[in-house]
Image: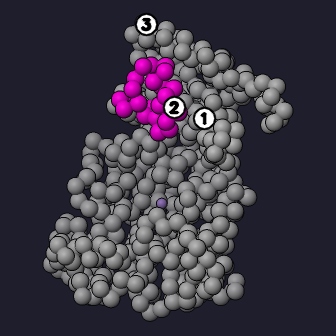
Amino acid sequence: MFSKDTYIQRRQELKKLVGEGVILIFGNNNSPCNFPNNGYYPFRQDSTFLYYFGQQRDGLVGVIDIDNDIETLIGDDIDIEDIVWYGSVESVHDLAEQVGVHNSAPMKSLKTICNDAMSKKRKIHFLPPYRFDIKLQIFDLLGIHPNQQKEEASMDLIKAVIKMRSTKTPEEIEELERAAVIGYKMHTTAMKLTRPGVTEKFVGGQVDGIANSYGAMVSFPTIFSQHGEIMHGNPSMSILEAGRLALCDAGAETINNYCSDNTRTMPVSGKFTQRQLEIYSIVEACHDYALEVAKPGVKYADVHFAVCRLMFDKLKELGLAKGDTEEAVKAGAHAMFLPHGLGHMMGMDVHDMENFDQINVGFDEEVRPNLEQFGTNCLRMGRRLEEGFVVTDEPGIYFIPALIDDWKASGHCAEFLNFDKLETYKDFGGIRIEDDLLITKDGCRFLGKDRIPYHPKDVEDYMAANR
Ligand SMILES: [Mn+2]
């Protein structure tokens, strides 16, 4: 947790930005696994609740009455039976005091607060809920059917929260740096363990254990797969084979729930083949390009498309692509290889604030998303960068057999792709290299004290030194 003042100041700023009405910020409830008292471990608090109210306890709601300048932490104190099973914990009143909130009240009083505000026709602001229990809570409190809650959520509140959470303060950057240190340990462990004969699940499980040991948890389910071309390929029981690539996309959350997100792709044998090196070096060049150009004022969509053009040019040299690069990227031909965006915002969520929709987080009035074109419709971040933003830089090249078949059959982008050559890459897999960029006053830098090895020679040397 940060100091009390941090939370007080954040709520002050939020009140100014939203202007009037009553703000409800729901913390998460315990999420049962198999039976009610067997909570799905570890408990993950809602990030926005953490941002303004800092407390990790389940079953809390923060209420900010802007017009009367009253802040209340709502929640029920535990009883003697809970103490028997889980030990004593602080009262809701104490939790409130720790984050500078002067009032606390039991959960049943939330209904009274809402009824009172509704009877006076005051605006009640809430965020779009993503858990069903919270949807039921909102239904009970405000009478809004779960199907209507997304559109009834307060755009003023959404915009204010996005504005505040997008720019990371020095104390948040310190947390992100801590997450990066754990991420380094996770990825170098994967490099040490990757070898023929072990299962994907074994490496993935060890990587997860490091996140648990040094922080709160993984920042998203670890991807560790020889099928790097499957975007979210979770570790399976398949056995690593010499000659193939293993892609590891993993990150940690610190105790305070700030994230890291990195990807490395390594040769199972410890040595890249010539064909793997050719593709790897293109991804490497694209990855390094973002570091050169990302700075305040630059549209991340422009960086993305510049990377796509660079990638396409180099794929032409290998005979996998052809035609005019500019036209090819306009037509979306690059999405055969790179069907996702260059990166996303990162903070307390690995895809920061994704619950508010990327159209609100990664785009704005000036930079609008393209929701039509395959690949381009997956861009999570397009708007101009600002100092204090943290974005990922994660280009990749994938050979997806089903996509090759699909486009070949329909002739999609046939003037820009060499399908005969693509056929010979169907067993390749995929390569992605990902690091996290902090946008500084006049440029950017990678988060993390040490870079996880990513130049091919460095990856090979690291693997050789740790056999
Ligand atoms: Mn990522």
On screen, residue 215 versus residue 293, left or right, reads right
On screen, residue 23 versus residue 379, left or right, reads right
Q: Is residue 463 above or below residue 327?
A: below
Residue named by callout 1? 29
Dot 1 or dot 3, earlier in sequence: 1
**Amino acid at pointer 1:** Asn
Residue 146 part of the magenta segment:
yes
Residue named by callout 2? 134
Residue named by callout 3? 119
Point out the residue furthest to the bottom here.
Answer: 274
Q: Is residue 39 above or below residue 17?
A: below
- The reply to whether the residue tagged 3 has its Cβ within 8 angstroms of ligand 1 is no
Query: Looking at the picture, how far across and down is residue 6, in whole percent?
Result: 62, 34
**Amino acid at pointer 3:** Ser
Give the magenta-colored segment's residue range: 127-149
On screen, residue 78 versus residue 300, left or right, reads right
- Element under disc 3: helix
